Image (tube, rainbow, N blue to C red):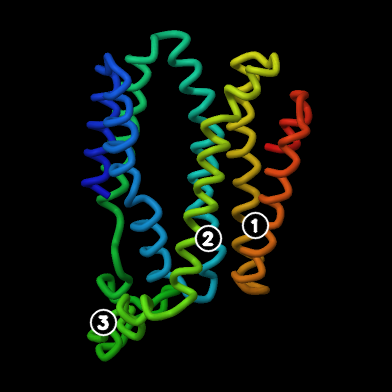
């Protein structure tokens, strides 16, 4: 978390100094990507160690942060750019991200055993405290399973579609005559509605299984993408979002 915070803050500082397209590719496409790459990995693996019975719901609560960021930051960035220019906006957002991430990193604990606990807050016994966490299924064993590669493929394809929407929905809306401010609210809407969706699907996964929850989400996602070919009004795009 600390390393990610400093790399992300550095990336936004460098972006504020950008003078050429190649720098955008380097600083945003590479350095920002490195700074963000540990977020889901670090946070969700930590949640998996701390919770067993309500793991889906707790994962959903943590991922609410992603939705909240999508809700707040497109509008905040648009306002900062309008008032101070994009260079200053990069500096402000980078400093804010670094400060928040560094602050919260100090409170993180990798494993409940480090605090004398087992998952779900159960007190640890001397024997359980000595046992290594997660040793029952190694990465080497996981790489021998078909499910491992299927989940990697699903994750890759899902994020490919998600980032495509985030990148193109704003300019697409402006291309069909929608103002820049209204277009920015589309990304915010996706983030805001996803907050509710993450909580609902987290609970759904705990009750009926993550496999069913994943299938339901992917069906809805595919239907939304297909419908985008026919949407040319702002209210339609809000339904899509």
The residue to which callout 2 is attached is 154
Q: Secondary structure at mark 1?
A: helix
Disc 1 and disc 2 in contact, CB within 8 angstroms: yes
The residue to which callout 1 is attached is 218
Disc 2 and disc 3 in contact, CB within 8 angstroms: no
Residue 138 location, quadrant? bottom left
Q: Residues within 10 Å of mark 2 (few under 14, many from 20)?
A: few
Residue 44 percent across, percent down from the top left: 41, 60
Which comes sooner in the sequence, label 2 or label 3? 3
Task: Measure the alpha-carbon separation of dots 2 and 3.
Answer: 30 Å
Residue 108 location, quadrant? bottom left
Q: Nearer the viewer, mark 3 or mark 1?
A: 1
Q: Is residue 231 left or right of residue 58?
A: right
Q: Nearer the viewer, mark 2 or mark 3?
A: 2
Q: Residue at x 53, y 76 (%)?
A: 53
> Looking at the rendered structure, which numbered label has been put on residue 132?
3
| Quarter containing the C terminus | top right
Residue 54 percent across, percent down from the top left: 54, 70
Which comes sooner in the sequence, label 3 or label 1? 3
Task: Measure the alpha-carbon separation of dots 1 and 2.
Answer: 9 Å
Q: Residues within 10 Å of mark 1 (few under 14, many from 20)?
A: some
Q: Residue at x 64, y 34 (%)?
A: 189
Q: Is residue 238 left or right of residue 134?
A: right
- Which is more toward the observer, 102 or 197? 197
């Amino acid at each position: 978390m600390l390393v990610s915070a400093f790399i992300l803050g550095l990336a936004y500082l460098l972006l504020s100094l950008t003078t050429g397209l190649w720098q955008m590719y380097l600083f945003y496409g590479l350095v920002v990507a490195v700074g963000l790459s540990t977020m889901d990995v670090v946070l969700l693996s930590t949640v998996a160690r701390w919770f067993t019975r309500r793991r889906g719901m707790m994962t959903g609560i943590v991922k609410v942060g992603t939705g909240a960021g999508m809700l707040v930051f497109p509008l905040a960035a648009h306002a900062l750019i309008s008032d101070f220019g994009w260079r200053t906006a990069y500096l402000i957002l980078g400093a804010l991200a670094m400060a928040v991430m560094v602050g919260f990193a100090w409170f993180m604990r990798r494993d409940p055993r480090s605090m004398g606990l087992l998952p779900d807050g159960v007190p640890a016994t001397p024997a359980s405290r000595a046992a290594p966490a997660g040793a029952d299924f190694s990465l080497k064993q996981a790489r021998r399973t078909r499910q491992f590669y299927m989940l990697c493929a699903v994750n890759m394809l899902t994020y490919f579609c998600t980032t495509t929407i985030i990148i193109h929905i704003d300019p697409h809306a402006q291309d069909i005559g929608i103002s820049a401010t209204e277009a920015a609210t589309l990304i915010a809407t996706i983030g805001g509605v996803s907050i509710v969706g993450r909580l609902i699907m987290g609970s759904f996964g705990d009750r009926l299984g993550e496999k069913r929850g994943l299938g339901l989400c992917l069906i809805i996602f595919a239907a939304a993408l297909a419908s985008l070919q026919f949407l040319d009004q702002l209210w339609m795009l809000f339904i899509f979002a």
